[in-house]
Image (cartoon, rainbow, N blue to C red):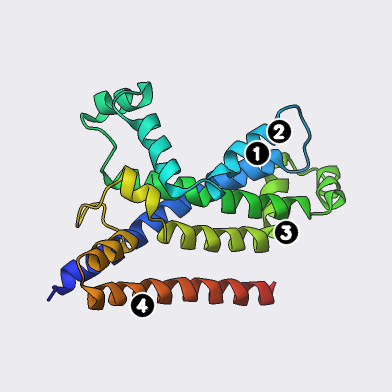
Amino acid sequence: MIGNDTFWSPVKLSLEVASFSLFIVLIVGIVAAKFMANKSFKGKSVIETIMLLPLVLPPSVVGFLLIVIFGTRSFLGQAIEQLFSQSIIFTWWAAVISAVVVAFPLMYQSAKTGFETIDRDIEDASRVDGANEFRVFTLITLPLASNAIITGAILSFARALGEFGATLMFAGNIPGKTQTIPTAIYVAMDSGNMKLAWSWVFVILFISFSMLILMNVIKKRY
């Protein structure tokens, strides 16, 4: 048997990690997409390829690269360890970083597609009327691309929620600290506790199904 607190701990942690990573991905993804949309410059394809790589790389490779980048042997890892007196590996933040890395391409690609479908004459007309770039972006561009942005946000949240490989390698599987639903399912199944594994599977299925339903409802309303 397993207590309610123990059962719901991975669920709570997964929702926290997915929500916080979505907040980061939403901001960074929109900024990056706006910068890259409808622009052509030398090296753009290389930059975009790097940003989209987590979509095609095996999760184990993503986890390995994160360990190399943030490990104690790297400059960044050493700087973080000196600043916070501990390594970022096997912490809650490691789970967030893993989720951000794998979810970012979905947000970026969706937002970029939304920005590129906007009629630029509409934006130019608002500039002629005296609106500055910030007002054009917040009052014209974002509302017109809102459908694509919301879709990207929902897909990013679902992807962050279901992240397993990179999280297991980079954040580990520490109950109450870094154990998310996917890693909890893996451990439960590996130990032969199929009833517990199925319980977590139904939870994540319900959440993911709800996210997709919400996305379809939003698409129909816009």
Q: Residues within 10 Å of mark 1 (few under 14, many from 20)?
A: some
Q: Amino acid at mark 1?
A: Glu
Residue 82 appears anywhere in the view: yes
Disc 1 to disc 4, how far (Cα)? 36 Å
Vertical side of 200 occupied by 120: above or below: above
Disc 2 to disc 3, how far (Cα)? 24 Å
Q: Residues within 10 Å of mark 2 (few under 14, many from 20)?
A: few
Q: Are marks 2 and 4 in contact (CB under 8 Å)?
A: no
Q: Amino acid at mark 2?
A: Lys
Residue 24 appears anywhere in the view: no
Q: Mark 2 or mark 4: which comes first in sequence?
A: 2
| Residue behind mark 4 | 202
Q: Nearer the viewer, residue 208 or 49?
A: 49
* 192 to the left or right of 159: left
| Residue behind mark 3 | 144
Q: Mark 1 or mark 4: which comes first in sequence?
A: 1
